[in-house]
Amino acid sequence: MRAILQRVSSASCTVDGEITGQIGTGFLVLLGIEDADTTEDLQWLAQKITGMRVFSDEAGLMNKSLADVDGDILLISQFTLFAQTKKGNRPSFIRAARPDKAIPLYEQMKDALHLLTGKKIATGIFGADMKIALVNDGPVTISIDTKNKE
């Protein structure tokens, strides 16, 4: 699993002119799922997302977590995080999980994040043509890969 966390002061997802998810302060999480992903990857990543201390404290240092700032999460599925670009100019997405595997894991991630935060998780619509608007705060953008834990 790969996730791009963007610390935002606001973010929203619109599908066909309708807002499907909207948050204020928190994380916009772009989530990519591959065939090799397991529930262990999901649990590790959910813990990492909710525990990430990248919000500013009173001294302006990144010491606060999502819970410390009462932040929210907008979770967006994004298979393009598994683009392979080594050959040619047209990316291959062969490593991205097909919907029959990815949708249940996406839903489990939404549930795991809800359990860890105690908050409703805002979402897009899996597989839809989504328009994402955000105000990246900082900017702070963190990339996390469960298969390459750096």
Image (cartoon, rainbow, N blue to C red):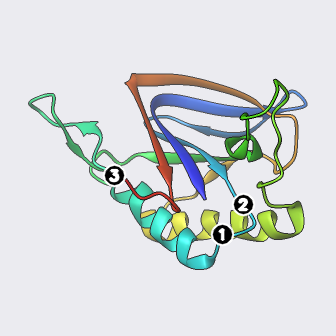
Query: Are dots 3 and 1 in contact, CB under 8 Å?
Result: no
Identify whether 111 is placed above or below 20: below
Residue at (47% x, 57% y) in the render: 148
In this orientation, does residue 118 appear? no
Query: Are dots 2 and 1 in contact, CB under 8 Å?
Result: yes
Other-residue count near label 3 (Cα within 10 Å), few / some / many at <14 / 14–19 / ≥20: some
State which tag comes first along the sequence, 3 or 1.
1
Identify whether 82 is placed above or below 9: below
Residue 97, image x, y percentages: 80, 60
The residues bearing labels 3 and 1 have C-alpha atoms spaced at a distance of 21 Å
On the rendered structure, is 90 left or right of 30?
Answer: right
Other-residue count near label 2 (Cα within 10 Å), few / some / many at <14 / 14–19 / ≥20: many
Residue linked to disc 1: 37
Residue 66, image x, y percentages: 35, 50
On the rendered structure, is 133 left or right of 97?
Answer: left
Corner quadrant of residue 17: top right
As helix, strand or loop, the secondary structure at mark 2 comes to: loop
Other-residue count near label 1 (Cα within 10 Å), few / some / many at <14 / 14–19 / ≥20: some
Q: What's under tag 2, amino acid-wise?
A: Glu
Residue 50, image x, y percentages: 40, 58
Residue linked to disc 2: 34
On the rendered structure, is 8 left or right of 57?
Answer: right
Residue linked to disc 3: 52
Identify whether 127 is placed above or below 48: above
As helix, strand or loop, the secondary structure at mark 1 comes to: loop
Residue at (55% x, 70% y) in the render: 41
On the rendered structure, is 36 left or right of 39?
Answer: right
The residues bearing labels 2 and 1 have C-alpha atoms spaced at a distance of 6 Å
Identify whether 99 is placed above or below 22: below
In this orientation, does residue 126 appear? yes
